[in-house]
Image (spheres, grey):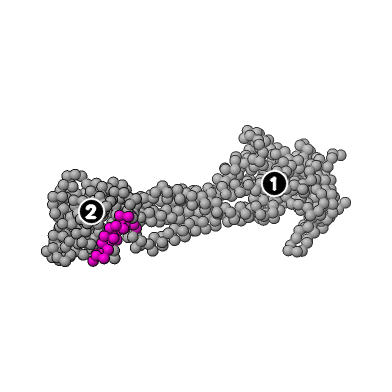
Amino acid sequence: MKLLKLITKNAGRHKLRTILTVVGLALAVMAFGLIRTFIIAWYASARASAPDRLVTRHSVSIVFTLPLAYKEQLLQVDGVEDVTFGCWFGGIYVDPKNFFANFAVEHTSFLRIYPEYIVPPDQLDAFASERQAAVVGRKLADRFGWKLGDQITLTGTIYPGDWQFVIRGIYSGKTVDTDETAFLFRYDYLDERMKEESPGRAGQIGWYILKIDDPNRSAEIGSKIDARFDNSWAETKTETEKDFALSFIQMSSAIIVGLRIVSYLIIGVIFLVLANTMAMTARERISENAFMRTLGFRGYHLVGLILGESLLIALMGGLCGMLLLYVVSSGVGVALSQFFPGFEADAMTYMLTTATAILIGVAASVFPINRALRIKIVDGLRVVD
Amino acid sequence: MNAPIVKILGLFKSYYRDSLEIPVLHDINLDIPQGQFLALMGPSGSGKTTLLNLIAGIDRPTSGTLAVAGEEIGKLTEQQMAKWRSRHIGFIFQFYNLLPVLTAYENVELPLLLTSLSRKERKEHVETALSIVGLSDRMKHYPRQLSGGQEQRVAIARAVVSDPTLLLADEPTGDLDKNSAEDIMTLLARLNKEYGKTIVMVTHDPRAAEKANFVRHLDKGELQQ
Protein backbone atom coordinates (compact mmCIF):
# COMPACT_ATOMS: atom_id res chain seq x y z
CA MET A 1 0.00 0.00 0.00
CA LYS A 2 1.35 3.37 -0.89
CA LEU A 3 0.23 6.85 0.07
CA LEU A 4 -1.55 7.25 -3.27
CA LYS A 5 -3.85 4.42 -2.31
CA LEU A 6 -4.50 6.11 1.03
CA ILE A 7 -5.34 9.35 -0.78
CA THR A 8 -7.86 7.50 -2.95
CA LYS A 9 -9.36 5.75 0.05
CA ASN A 10 -9.59 8.98 2.01
CA ALA A 11 -11.37 10.68 -0.87
CA GLY A 12 -13.94 7.89 -0.85
CA ARG A 13 -14.38 7.90 2.92
CA HIS A 14 -17.63 9.90 2.81
CA LYS A 15 -18.91 8.76 -0.53
CA LEU A 16 -22.06 10.86 -0.61
CA ARG A 17 -20.16 14.02 0.35
CA THR A 18 -17.47 13.36 -2.21
CA ILE A 19 -20.04 12.63 -4.92
CA LEU A 20 -21.98 15.80 -4.11
CA THR A 21 -18.77 17.82 -4.13
CA VAL A 22 -17.70 16.34 -7.45
CA VAL A 23 -21.14 16.99 -8.96
CA GLY A 24 -21.07 20.57 -7.65
CA LEU A 25 -17.62 21.08 -9.10
CA ALA A 26 -18.61 19.48 -12.39
CA LEU A 27 -21.63 21.73 -12.81
CA ALA A 28 -19.62 24.82 -11.93
CA VAL A 29 -16.78 23.83 -14.25
CA MET A 30 -19.26 23.22 -17.05
CA ALA A 31 -20.92 26.60 -16.45
CA PHE A 32 -17.53 28.30 -16.43
CA GLY A 33 -16.52 26.60 -19.68
CA LEU A 34 -19.87 27.29 -21.29
CA ILE A 35 -19.72 31.00 -20.49
CA ARG A 36 -16.18 31.18 -21.83
CA THR A 37 -17.32 29.42 -24.99
CA PHE A 38 -20.16 31.93 -25.36
CA ILE A 39 -17.73 34.81 -25.06
CA ILE A 40 -15.40 33.23 -27.61
CA ALA A 41 -18.32 32.61 -29.96
CA TRP A 42 -19.32 36.24 -29.54
CA TYR A 43 -15.99 37.21 -31.02
CA ALA A 44 -16.23 34.73 -33.91
CA SER A 45 -16.89 37.45 -36.46
CA ALA A 46 -13.77 39.31 -35.36
CA ARG A 47 -11.73 36.12 -35.59
CA ALA A 48 -13.12 35.35 -39.04
CA SER A 49 -12.06 38.74 -40.37
CA ALA A 50 -9.19 38.94 -42.79
CA PRO A 51 -6.19 41.20 -42.09
CA ASP A 52 -6.07 42.37 -45.71
CA ARG A 53 -9.61 43.74 -45.70
CA LEU A 54 -10.63 47.23 -44.65
CA VAL A 55 -14.14 48.54 -44.12
CA THR A 56 -15.06 52.08 -45.03
CA ARG A 57 -18.30 53.46 -43.60
CA HIS A 58 -19.86 56.77 -42.83
CA SER A 59 -17.82 58.59 -40.18
CA VAL A 60 -20.88 59.30 -38.03
CA SER A 61 -22.51 55.89 -37.94
CA ILE A 62 -23.06 52.74 -39.95
CA VAL A 63 -26.70 53.85 -40.14
CA PHE A 64 -25.76 56.58 -42.58
CA THR A 65 -25.09 55.60 -46.16
CA LEU A 66 -22.25 56.40 -48.52
CA PRO A 67 -22.50 57.29 -52.20
CA LEU A 68 -21.93 54.49 -54.66
CA ALA A 69 -19.77 56.96 -56.53
CA TYR A 70 -16.98 56.57 -53.94
CA LYS A 71 -16.13 53.17 -55.34
CA GLU A 72 -14.06 54.46 -58.26
CA GLN A 73 -12.21 56.87 -56.00
CA LEU A 74 -11.44 54.12 -53.54
CA LEU A 75 -9.95 51.99 -56.28
CA GLN A 76 -7.53 54.81 -57.05
CA VAL A 77 -6.07 54.85 -53.54
CA ASP A 78 -2.57 53.43 -53.46
CA GLY A 79 -2.61 49.95 -51.88
CA VAL A 80 -6.26 49.19 -52.61
CA GLU A 81 -6.51 46.17 -54.87
CA ASP A 82 -10.22 45.58 -55.01
CA VAL A 83 -13.43 47.11 -53.72
CA THR A 84 -16.90 45.77 -53.06
CA PHE A 85 -19.76 47.00 -50.98
CA GLY A 86 -22.74 45.88 -48.98
CA CYS A 87 -25.97 47.23 -47.66
CA TRP A 88 -27.97 46.05 -44.63
CA PHE A 89 -31.43 45.16 -45.91
CA GLY A 90 -33.21 44.17 -42.70
CA GLY A 91 -35.87 42.06 -44.45
CA ILE A 92 -38.24 39.77 -42.55
CA TYR A 93 -39.01 36.27 -43.70
CA VAL A 94 -42.65 35.46 -42.84
CA ASP A 95 -42.26 36.34 -39.14
CA PRO A 96 -39.90 38.76 -37.33
CA LYS A 97 -38.85 35.82 -35.14
CA ASN A 98 -37.15 34.29 -38.19
CA PHE A 99 -34.28 36.70 -37.90
CA PHE A 100 -31.22 36.34 -40.10
CA ALA A 101 -28.75 38.75 -41.63
CA ASN A 102 -29.63 39.80 -45.18
CA PHE A 103 -27.50 42.07 -47.33
CA ALA A 104 -27.54 43.58 -50.75
CA VAL A 105 -24.07 43.09 -52.22
CA GLU A 106 -22.31 43.81 -55.45
CA HIS A 107 -22.55 40.41 -57.06
CA THR A 108 -19.54 40.82 -59.32
CA SER A 109 -17.03 41.57 -56.60
CA PHE A 110 -18.37 40.51 -53.22
CA LEU A 111 -17.65 36.79 -53.42
CA ARG A 112 -14.27 37.59 -55.01
CA ILE A 113 -13.22 39.53 -51.92
CA TYR A 114 -14.76 36.94 -49.59
CA PRO A 115 -13.17 33.69 -50.78
CA GLU A 116 -14.19 32.02 -47.51
CA TYR A 117 -17.75 31.94 -48.87
CA ILE A 118 -17.52 28.92 -51.13
CA VAL A 119 -20.12 28.83 -53.92
CA PRO A 120 -20.07 26.19 -56.69
CA PRO A 121 -19.16 27.78 -60.07
CA ASP A 122 -22.48 26.98 -61.75
CA GLN A 123 -24.37 28.60 -58.87
CA LEU A 124 -22.07 31.58 -59.09
CA ASP A 125 -22.94 31.91 -62.77
CA ALA A 126 -26.64 31.68 -61.93
CA PHE A 127 -26.21 34.43 -59.30
CA ALA A 128 -24.52 36.62 -61.91
CA SER A 129 -27.14 36.11 -64.57
CA GLU A 130 -30.36 36.85 -62.68
CA ARG A 131 -31.15 40.11 -60.92
CA GLN A 132 -33.43 38.56 -58.27
CA ALA A 133 -30.97 35.79 -57.48
CA ALA A 134 -29.86 35.21 -53.92
CA VAL A 135 -27.06 33.18 -52.37
CA VAL A 136 -27.70 31.85 -48.87
CA GLY A 137 -25.57 30.14 -46.28
CA ARG A 138 -25.85 26.41 -45.84
CA LYS A 139 -27.10 26.64 -42.23
CA LEU A 140 -29.74 29.19 -43.22
CA ALA A 141 -30.92 26.97 -46.07
CA ASP A 142 -31.06 24.02 -43.68
CA ARG A 143 -32.99 26.06 -41.14
CA PHE A 144 -35.82 26.87 -43.52
CA GLY A 145 -35.47 23.86 -45.81
CA TRP A 146 -34.62 26.05 -48.79
CA LYS A 147 -33.41 24.50 -52.02
CA LEU A 148 -31.98 25.91 -55.20
CA GLY A 149 -34.75 27.45 -57.27
CA ASP A 150 -37.01 28.21 -54.30
CA GLN A 151 -38.77 31.55 -54.42
CA ILE A 152 -38.45 33.56 -51.24
CA THR A 153 -40.21 36.75 -50.23
CA LEU A 154 -38.69 39.13 -47.71
CA THR A 155 -40.65 42.02 -46.32
CA GLY A 156 -38.46 45.08 -46.18
CA THR A 157 -38.17 47.21 -43.06
CA ILE A 158 -35.53 49.69 -44.18
CA TYR A 159 -36.60 49.30 -47.79
CA PRO A 160 -40.40 48.93 -47.63
CA GLY A 161 -42.45 46.43 -49.57
CA ASP A 162 -42.27 42.78 -50.46
CA TRP A 163 -39.15 41.64 -52.24
CA GLN A 164 -39.04 38.44 -54.25
CA PHE A 165 -35.87 36.40 -54.57
CA VAL A 166 -34.88 33.10 -56.13
CA ILE A 167 -32.33 30.94 -54.37
CA ARG A 168 -29.59 30.40 -56.95
CA GLY A 169 -26.70 29.53 -54.69
CA ILE A 170 -25.92 27.96 -51.34
CA TYR A 171 -22.51 28.77 -49.92
CA SER A 172 -20.40 26.87 -47.42
CA GLY A 173 -17.89 28.39 -45.06
CA LYS A 174 -14.20 27.75 -45.48
CA THR A 175 -13.68 27.51 -41.68
CA VAL A 176 -15.91 26.84 -38.69
CA ASP A 177 -15.85 30.54 -37.85
CA THR A 178 -17.29 31.51 -41.23
CA ASP A 179 -20.87 32.60 -40.89
CA GLU A 180 -23.16 30.29 -42.86
CA THR A 181 -26.36 32.06 -41.96
CA ALA A 182 -26.31 35.10 -44.26
CA PHE A 183 -28.69 35.90 -47.09
CA LEU A 184 -26.93 37.75 -49.94
CA PHE A 185 -28.68 39.26 -52.90
CA ARG A 186 -27.77 41.62 -55.69
CA TYR A 187 -27.48 45.30 -54.99
CA ASP A 188 -28.56 46.22 -58.51
CA TYR A 189 -31.99 44.67 -57.75
CA LEU A 190 -32.34 46.95 -54.72
CA ASP A 191 -30.98 49.99 -56.50
CA GLU A 192 -33.22 49.54 -59.51
CA ARG A 193 -36.33 49.52 -57.35
CA MET A 194 -35.12 52.44 -55.25
CA LYS A 195 -34.72 54.49 -58.41
CA GLU A 196 -38.40 53.90 -59.12
CA GLU A 197 -39.84 54.13 -55.61
CA SER A 198 -37.49 56.35 -53.68
CA PRO A 199 -34.98 58.01 -55.98
CA GLY A 200 -33.26 59.84 -53.18
CA ARG A 201 -32.05 56.55 -51.75
CA ALA A 202 -30.76 55.15 -55.01
CA GLY A 203 -27.01 55.02 -55.46
CA GLN A 204 -26.44 54.73 -51.73
CA ILE A 205 -24.70 51.84 -50.05
CA GLY A 206 -23.98 50.87 -46.43
CA TRP A 207 -20.26 50.23 -46.40
CA TYR A 208 -17.34 49.45 -48.64
CA ILE A 209 -15.03 46.51 -48.21
CA LEU A 210 -11.55 47.02 -49.58
CA LYS A 211 -8.93 44.42 -50.28
CA ILE A 212 -5.49 45.88 -49.71
CA ASP A 213 -2.11 44.70 -50.93
CA ASP A 214 -0.34 44.77 -47.56
CA PRO A 215 -2.03 44.29 -44.15
CA ASN A 216 0.86 46.17 -42.55
CA ARG A 217 -0.25 49.30 -44.39
CA SER A 218 -3.86 49.16 -43.21
CA ALA A 219 -3.56 52.21 -40.95
CA GLU A 220 -1.81 54.25 -43.63
CA ILE A 221 -4.29 53.29 -46.34
CA GLY A 222 -7.22 53.91 -44.04
CA SER A 223 -5.93 57.40 -43.23
CA LYS A 224 -5.49 58.19 -46.90
CA ILE A 225 -9.03 57.14 -47.70
CA ASP A 226 -10.56 59.13 -44.86
CA ALA A 227 -8.44 62.15 -45.80
CA ARG A 228 -9.70 61.93 -49.35
CA PHE A 229 -13.31 62.31 -48.18
CA ASP A 230 -12.66 64.89 -45.50
CA ASN A 231 -15.05 67.82 -45.67
CA SER A 232 -17.29 65.99 -48.13
CA TRP A 233 -20.97 65.63 -47.30
CA ALA A 234 -20.35 61.98 -46.45
CA GLU A 235 -17.09 61.73 -44.56
CA THR A 236 -15.74 58.25 -44.03
CA LYS A 237 -14.24 56.15 -41.32
CA THR A 238 -11.98 53.35 -42.45
CA GLU A 239 -10.82 50.56 -40.19
CA THR A 240 -9.71 46.97 -40.43
CA GLU A 241 -12.42 44.41 -40.82
CA LYS A 242 -11.56 43.11 -37.36
CA ASP A 243 -12.02 46.52 -35.76
CA PHE A 244 -15.24 46.92 -37.67
CA ALA A 245 -16.51 43.59 -36.28
CA LEU A 246 -15.31 44.50 -32.80
CA SER A 247 -17.20 47.79 -32.93
CA PHE A 248 -20.41 45.77 -33.24
CA ILE A 249 -19.33 43.48 -30.44
CA GLN A 250 -18.60 46.48 -28.25
CA MET A 251 -22.27 47.42 -28.49
CA SER A 252 -22.96 44.39 -26.32
CA SER A 253 -19.90 44.83 -24.14
CA ALA A 254 -22.02 45.13 -20.98
CA ILE A 255 -23.34 41.62 -21.57
CA ILE A 256 -19.83 40.29 -22.09
CA VAL A 257 -18.56 42.03 -18.97
CA GLY A 258 -21.51 40.58 -17.08
CA LEU A 259 -20.72 37.10 -18.38
CA ARG A 260 -17.09 37.48 -17.42
CA ILE A 261 -18.05 38.53 -13.89
CA VAL A 262 -20.37 35.54 -13.62
CA SER A 263 -17.57 33.23 -14.78
CA TYR A 264 -15.26 34.61 -12.08
CA LEU A 265 -18.01 34.16 -9.50
CA ILE A 266 -18.34 30.58 -10.63
CA ILE A 267 -14.65 30.03 -9.95
CA GLY A 268 -15.31 31.40 -6.47
CA VAL A 269 -18.20 28.97 -6.06
CA ILE A 270 -16.03 26.06 -7.18
CA PHE A 271 -13.44 27.09 -4.62
CA LEU A 272 -15.96 27.39 -1.81
CA VAL A 273 -17.53 24.01 -2.58
CA LEU A 274 -14.20 22.23 -2.40
CA ALA A 275 -12.82 24.32 0.44
CA ASN A 276 -15.90 23.49 2.50
CA THR A 277 -15.43 19.78 1.91
CA MET A 278 -11.74 19.95 2.75
CA ALA A 279 -12.41 22.05 5.87
CA MET A 280 -14.87 19.42 7.12
CA THR A 281 -12.30 16.75 6.33
CA ALA A 282 -9.65 18.64 8.26
CA ARG A 283 -11.84 18.92 11.31
CA GLU A 284 -12.77 15.26 11.27
CA ARG A 285 -9.19 14.10 10.93
CA ILE A 286 -7.45 16.17 13.57
CA SER A 287 -6.80 13.17 15.80
CA GLU A 288 -6.02 10.94 12.84
CA ASN A 289 -3.40 13.36 11.55
CA ALA A 290 -1.94 13.62 15.05
CA PHE A 291 -1.83 9.83 15.23
CA MET A 292 -0.07 9.65 11.85
CA ARG A 293 2.54 12.06 13.16
CA THR A 294 2.91 9.90 16.28
CA LEU A 295 3.79 7.00 13.99
CA GLY A 296 6.54 9.13 12.50
CA PHE A 297 4.83 10.54 9.43
CA ARG A 298 6.31 13.96 8.71
CA GLY A 299 4.70 17.20 7.72
CA TYR A 300 5.30 16.60 4.03
CA HIS A 301 3.48 13.28 4.25
CA LEU A 302 0.41 15.05 5.61
CA VAL A 303 0.79 17.77 2.97
CA GLY A 304 0.86 15.04 0.33
CA LEU A 305 -2.19 13.29 1.75
CA ILE A 306 -4.33 16.40 2.12
CA LEU A 307 -3.18 18.09 -1.08
CA GLY A 308 -3.52 14.82 -2.96
CA GLU A 309 -7.09 14.33 -1.75
CA SER A 310 -8.04 17.90 -2.59
CA LEU A 311 -6.47 17.64 -6.03
CA LEU A 312 -8.09 14.28 -6.66
CA ILE A 313 -11.57 15.62 -5.89
CA ALA A 314 -10.90 18.81 -7.86
CA LEU A 315 -9.69 16.85 -10.87
CA MET A 316 -12.61 14.43 -10.71
CA GLY A 317 -14.95 17.43 -10.66
CA GLY A 318 -12.95 19.08 -13.43
CA LEU A 319 -12.99 15.96 -15.58
CA CYS A 320 -16.72 15.37 -15.12
CA GLY A 321 -17.28 19.07 -15.79
CA MET A 322 -15.31 18.89 -19.01
CA LEU A 323 -17.25 15.86 -20.18
CA LEU A 324 -20.47 17.73 -19.40
CA LEU A 325 -19.10 20.79 -21.17
CA TYR A 326 -18.33 18.73 -24.26
CA VAL A 327 -21.83 17.28 -24.36
CA VAL A 328 -23.67 20.50 -23.53
CA SER A 329 -21.57 22.75 -25.76
CA SER A 330 -22.13 20.36 -28.66
CA GLY A 331 -25.87 20.48 -28.06
CA VAL A 332 -25.93 24.24 -27.60
CA GLY A 333 -23.71 24.60 -30.66
CA VAL A 334 -26.28 22.81 -32.80
CA ALA A 335 -29.20 24.72 -31.26
CA LEU A 336 -27.54 28.12 -31.67
CA SER A 337 -25.69 27.50 -34.89
CA GLN A 338 -27.74 30.27 -36.53
CA PHE A 339 -26.35 32.84 -34.14
CA PHE A 340 -23.00 31.43 -33.14
CA PRO A 341 -21.23 29.67 -36.01
CA GLY A 342 -18.60 27.28 -34.67
CA PHE A 343 -19.92 27.30 -31.12
CA GLU A 344 -17.74 24.68 -29.52
CA ALA A 345 -15.55 24.63 -26.43
CA ASP A 346 -11.99 25.02 -27.68
CA ALA A 347 -8.79 23.36 -26.46
CA MET A 348 -7.81 26.48 -24.54
CA THR A 349 -11.10 26.36 -22.61
CA TYR A 350 -10.43 22.76 -21.63
CA MET A 351 -6.85 23.60 -20.64
CA LEU A 352 -8.01 26.63 -18.66
CA THR A 353 -10.66 24.54 -16.94
CA THR A 354 -8.08 21.92 -16.00
CA ALA A 355 -5.69 24.57 -14.73
CA THR A 356 -8.50 26.17 -12.72
CA ALA A 357 -9.40 22.80 -11.18
CA ILE A 358 -5.77 22.22 -10.22
CA LEU A 359 -5.36 25.70 -8.76
CA ILE A 360 -8.56 25.37 -6.78
CA GLY A 361 -7.49 21.92 -5.58
CA VAL A 362 -4.28 23.44 -4.28
CA ALA A 363 -5.97 26.50 -2.78
CA ALA A 364 -8.66 24.45 -1.03
CA SER A 365 -6.01 22.35 0.71
CA VAL A 366 -4.14 25.30 2.22
CA PHE A 367 -6.36 25.67 5.30
CA PRO A 368 -6.54 21.94 6.14
CA ILE A 369 -2.79 21.56 5.66
CA ASN A 370 -2.10 24.54 7.87
CA ARG A 371 -4.41 23.15 10.53
CA ALA A 372 -2.91 19.66 10.37
CA LEU A 373 0.64 20.95 10.67
CA ARG A 374 0.13 23.60 13.30
CA ILE A 375 -1.75 21.60 15.88
CA LYS A 376 0.42 19.90 18.50
CA ILE A 377 0.33 16.11 18.40
CA VAL A 378 -0.81 15.84 22.01
CA ASP A 379 -3.61 18.35 21.41
CA GLY A 380 -4.66 16.53 18.26
CA LEU A 381 -4.79 13.18 20.02
CA ARG A 382 -7.13 14.61 22.64
CA VAL A 383 -9.74 15.43 20.01
CA VAL A 384 -12.36 12.70 19.90
CA ASP A 385 -13.99 12.12 16.51
CA MET B 1 19.53 -5.88 35.88
CA ASN B 2 19.52 -4.59 32.31
CA ALA B 3 20.81 -1.11 31.49
CA PRO B 4 18.05 1.52 31.46
CA ILE B 5 16.57 2.07 28.06
CA VAL B 6 14.69 5.09 29.37
CA LYS B 7 16.49 7.46 31.67
CA ILE B 8 14.61 10.40 33.13
CA LEU B 9 16.33 12.93 35.32
CA GLY B 10 14.79 15.95 37.06
CA LEU B 11 11.95 16.18 34.59
CA PHE B 12 9.41 18.98 34.91
CA LYS B 13 6.47 19.64 32.67
CA SER B 14 4.07 22.54 32.81
CA TYR B 15 1.29 23.67 30.52
CA TYR B 16 0.32 27.26 30.04
CA ARG B 17 -3.19 28.64 29.74
CA ASP B 18 -2.73 32.25 28.70
CA SER B 19 -0.15 33.41 31.26
CA LEU B 20 -1.17 30.85 33.88
CA GLU B 21 1.33 28.06 34.47
CA ILE B 22 -0.18 24.66 35.25
CA PRO B 23 2.46 22.29 36.59
CA VAL B 24 1.81 18.69 35.51
CA LEU B 25 4.99 16.77 36.30
CA HIS B 26 7.34 17.63 39.11
CA ASP B 27 10.92 16.46 39.37
CA ILE B 28 10.46 13.05 37.81
CA ASN B 29 13.40 10.69 38.06
CA LEU B 30 12.93 7.30 36.53
CA ASP B 31 15.00 4.56 34.95
CA ILE B 32 13.29 1.90 32.89
CA PRO B 33 15.52 -1.06 32.18
CA GLN B 34 15.39 -2.86 28.86
CA GLY B 35 12.85 -5.68 28.91
CA GLN B 36 10.80 -4.23 31.73
CA PHE B 37 7.01 -4.11 31.66
CA LEU B 38 6.21 -1.02 33.68
CA ALA B 39 2.72 0.02 34.66
CA LEU B 40 2.17 3.66 35.52
CA MET B 41 -0.84 4.12 37.71
CA GLY B 42 -2.47 7.07 39.32
CA PRO B 43 -5.66 9.07 39.50
CA SER B 44 -6.93 11.21 36.66
CA GLY B 45 -4.84 14.32 36.19
CA SER B 46 -1.84 12.84 37.92
CA GLY B 47 0.29 13.24 34.79
CA LYS B 48 0.52 9.59 33.63
CA THR B 49 -0.36 10.27 29.99
CA THR B 50 1.81 13.37 29.94
CA LEU B 51 4.79 11.32 31.09
CA LEU B 52 4.00 8.69 28.46
CA ASN B 53 3.77 11.37 25.76
CA LEU B 54 7.13 12.77 26.83
CA ILE B 55 8.75 9.34 26.63
CA ALA B 56 7.11 8.87 23.20
CA GLY B 57 8.62 12.11 21.96
CA ILE B 58 5.29 13.68 21.05
CA ASP B 59 5.65 16.33 23.73
CA ARG B 60 8.64 18.16 25.16
CA PRO B 61 9.66 18.57 28.79
CA THR B 62 9.75 22.01 30.34
CA SER B 63 13.05 21.13 31.97
CA GLY B 64 15.12 18.09 32.87
CA THR B 65 16.52 15.37 30.68
CA LEU B 66 14.87 12.39 29.07
CA ALA B 67 16.96 9.87 27.19
CA VAL B 68 15.65 6.88 25.31
CA ALA B 69 18.06 4.29 23.96
CA GLY B 70 20.89 6.66 24.81
CA GLU B 71 19.48 9.61 22.87
CA GLU B 72 18.35 12.73 24.64
CA ILE B 73 15.16 13.34 22.75
CA GLY B 74 14.46 16.80 24.10
CA LYS B 75 17.27 18.11 21.91
CA LEU B 76 15.94 16.70 18.66
CA THR B 77 14.25 18.90 16.08
CA GLU B 78 10.68 18.10 15.02
CA GLN B 79 11.92 16.34 11.89
CA GLN B 80 14.50 14.35 13.83
CA MET B 81 11.91 13.54 16.46
CA ALA B 82 9.48 12.18 13.85
CA LYS B 83 12.18 9.96 12.40
CA TRP B 84 13.20 8.89 15.90
CA ARG B 85 9.63 7.96 16.81
CA SER B 86 9.23 5.83 13.70
CA ARG B 87 12.34 3.89 14.65
CA HIS B 88 12.00 3.56 18.42
CA ILE B 89 8.37 3.89 19.49
CA GLY B 90 5.36 1.66 19.11
CA PHE B 91 2.27 3.38 20.50
CA ILE B 92 -0.95 1.68 21.59
CA PHE B 93 -3.92 3.99 22.18
CA GLN B 94 -7.01 3.52 24.28
CA PHE B 95 -9.26 4.01 21.22
CA TYR B 96 -7.04 1.97 18.85
CA ASN B 97 -6.67 4.80 16.28
CA LEU B 98 -7.03 2.50 13.32
CA LEU B 99 -7.71 4.16 9.98
CA PRO B 100 -11.26 3.12 9.07
CA VAL B 101 -10.55 3.09 5.33
CA LEU B 102 -7.72 0.59 5.64
CA THR B 103 -7.92 -3.14 6.26
CA ALA B 104 -6.24 -4.74 9.26
CA TYR B 105 -3.32 -5.63 7.00
CA GLU B 106 -3.02 -2.07 5.65
CA ASN B 107 -3.27 -0.54 9.11
CA VAL B 108 -0.46 -2.72 10.35
CA GLU B 109 1.57 -1.94 7.25
CA LEU B 110 1.28 1.82 7.83
CA PRO B 111 4.46 2.34 9.93
CA LEU B 112 6.45 0.27 7.44
CA LEU B 113 5.68 2.76 4.67
CA LEU B 114 8.21 5.01 6.38
CA THR B 115 10.93 2.41 5.98
CA SER B 116 12.86 1.30 2.94
CA LEU B 117 11.45 -2.23 3.09
CA SER B 118 10.26 -3.77 -0.14
CA ARG B 119 6.64 -4.77 -0.60
CA LYS B 120 7.59 -8.43 -0.03
CA GLU B 121 9.47 -7.62 3.16
CA ARG B 122 6.62 -5.50 4.40
CA LYS B 123 4.24 -8.37 3.74
CA GLU B 124 6.39 -10.74 5.79
CA HIS B 125 6.53 -8.28 8.67
CA VAL B 126 2.80 -7.58 8.63
CA GLU B 127 1.87 -11.26 8.47
CA THR B 128 4.21 -12.03 11.33
CA ALA B 129 2.82 -9.22 13.48
CA LEU B 130 -0.76 -10.24 12.79
CA SER B 131 0.01 -13.88 13.56
CA ILE B 132 1.57 -12.85 16.90
CA VAL B 133 -1.67 -11.12 17.88
CA GLY B 134 -3.71 -14.03 16.52
CA LEU B 135 -5.41 -12.21 13.67
CA SER B 136 -3.96 -13.91 10.61
CA ASP B 137 -7.48 -14.72 9.50
CA ARG B 138 -8.68 -11.12 9.77
CA MET B 139 -6.11 -9.44 7.52
CA LYS B 140 -8.63 -8.24 4.98
CA HIS B 141 -11.17 -7.06 7.50
CA TYR B 142 -11.84 -3.40 8.02
CA PRO B 143 -11.93 -1.98 11.57
CA ARG B 144 -15.73 -1.77 11.47
CA GLN B 145 -15.81 -5.53 10.86
CA LEU B 146 -13.78 -6.26 13.99
CA SER B 147 -14.67 -6.35 17.69
CA GLY B 148 -13.07 -3.87 20.08
CA GLY B 149 -10.64 -6.49 21.32
CA GLN B 150 -9.67 -7.42 17.77
CA GLU B 151 -9.20 -3.77 16.87
CA GLN B 152 -6.86 -3.34 19.81
CA ARG B 153 -4.94 -6.42 18.74
CA VAL B 154 -4.54 -4.93 15.27
CA ALA B 155 -3.28 -1.76 16.96
CA ILE B 156 -0.77 -3.83 18.93
CA ALA B 157 0.35 -5.58 15.74
CA ARG B 158 0.83 -2.14 14.20
CA ALA B 159 2.85 -1.05 17.23
CA VAL B 160 5.20 -4.01 17.06
CA VAL B 161 5.47 -4.46 13.30
CA SER B 162 8.50 -2.24 12.95
CA ASP B 163 10.16 -3.87 15.99
CA PRO B 164 10.48 -0.64 17.99
CA THR B 165 12.73 -0.15 20.98
CA LEU B 166 9.85 0.72 23.26
CA LEU B 167 6.15 -0.11 23.39
CA LEU B 168 4.01 2.59 24.98
CA ALA B 169 0.40 1.84 25.83
CA ASP B 170 -2.04 4.45 27.02
CA GLU B 171 -4.98 2.78 28.79
CA PRO B 172 -4.96 -0.09 26.28
CA THR B 173 -7.89 -1.82 27.99
CA GLY B 174 -9.85 1.29 28.83
CA ASP B 175 -12.39 0.79 26.08
CA LEU B 176 -12.73 -2.98 26.35
CA ASP B 177 -14.90 -5.43 28.22
CA LYS B 178 -13.39 -7.62 30.90
CA ASN B 179 -12.61 -10.62 28.69
CA SER B 180 -11.16 -8.59 25.87
CA ALA B 181 -9.11 -6.61 28.37
CA GLU B 182 -7.78 -9.84 29.80
CA ASP B 183 -6.79 -11.04 26.32
CA ILE B 184 -5.00 -7.78 25.55
CA MET B 185 -3.08 -7.83 28.82
CA THR B 186 -2.09 -11.45 28.23
CA LEU B 187 -0.87 -10.47 24.80
CA LEU B 188 1.18 -7.56 26.13
CA ALA B 189 2.66 -9.79 28.83
CA ARG B 190 3.57 -12.32 26.16
CA LEU B 191 5.22 -9.64 24.05
CA ASN B 192 7.26 -8.71 27.10
CA LYS B 193 8.20 -12.23 28.12
CA GLU B 194 8.57 -14.03 24.81
CA TYR B 195 9.83 -11.19 22.63
CA GLY B 196 11.60 -9.16 25.29
CA LYS B 197 9.71 -6.00 24.50
CA THR B 198 10.10 -3.10 26.89
CA ILE B 199 6.63 -1.83 27.68
CA VAL B 200 5.44 1.23 29.51
CA MET B 201 1.71 1.15 30.13
CA VAL B 202 -0.53 3.76 31.64
CA THR B 203 -3.60 2.30 33.30
CA HIS B 204 -6.29 2.87 35.87
CA ASP B 205 -7.04 -0.79 36.06
CA PRO B 206 -5.30 -2.68 38.90
CA ARG B 207 -5.99 -6.01 37.14
CA ALA B 208 -4.19 -4.77 34.07
CA ALA B 209 -1.34 -3.52 36.20
CA GLU B 210 -0.97 -7.00 37.70
CA LYS B 211 0.32 -8.24 34.38
CA ALA B 212 3.21 -5.77 34.54
CA ASN B 213 6.36 -6.75 36.36
CA PHE B 214 6.81 -3.30 37.83
CA VAL B 215 4.27 -0.69 38.93
CA ARG B 216 4.90 2.97 39.70
CA HIS B 217 2.32 5.40 40.98
CA LEU B 218 1.99 9.02 40.02
CA ASP B 219 0.12 11.46 42.17
CA LYS B 220 -0.22 15.17 41.50
CA GLY B 221 2.67 15.01 39.10
CA GLU B 222 5.05 13.27 41.40
CA LEU B 223 6.30 9.69 41.25
CA GLN B 224 5.62 7.83 44.46
CA GLN B 225 8.31 5.59 45.86
- Dot 1: few (<14), some (14–19), or many (≥20) neighbours within 10 Å? few
Q: Is residue A74 left or right of residue B116?
A: left
Residue B128 x, y percent position in the rendering: 68, 35
- The answer to whether any part of residue A314 appears in the image is no
Residue B7 x, y percent position in the rendering: 82, 45
Circle 1 residue: B79
Q: What kind of residue is marked 1?
A: Gln
Are the residues under badges 2 and 1 in a single subunit? no
* Relative depth, front residue between A237 and B173: A237
Circle 2 residue: A75
- The answer to whether any part of residue A46 appears in the image is yes
Q: Which stretch did the figure color magenta? A: A220-246
Q: Residue at x 66, y 46 (%)?
A: A298
Residue A370 x, y percent position in the rendering: 62, 54
* Relative depth, front residue between A201 and A261: A201
Q: Is residue B27 left or right of residue A67?
A: right
Q: Residue at x 45, y 48 (%)?
A: A351
**Image quadrant occupied by the C terminus of chain A:** bottom right
- Dot 2: few (<14), some (14–19), or many (≥20) neighbours within 10 Å? some
Chain of the residue that carries numbered disc 1 in the rendered image: B
Determine contact: label 2, label 1, CB under 8 Å: no
Q: What kind of residue is marked 2?
A: Leu
- The numbered mark at residue A345 is none
* Mark 1 secondary-structure assignment: helix
Chain of the residue that carries numbered disc 2 in the rendered image: A
Q: Quadrant of residue A38?
A: bottom left
**Image quadrant occupied by the N terminus of chain A:** top right
Q: CA distance from mark 2 to mark 1?
A: 80 Å
* Mark 2 secondary-structure assignment: helix
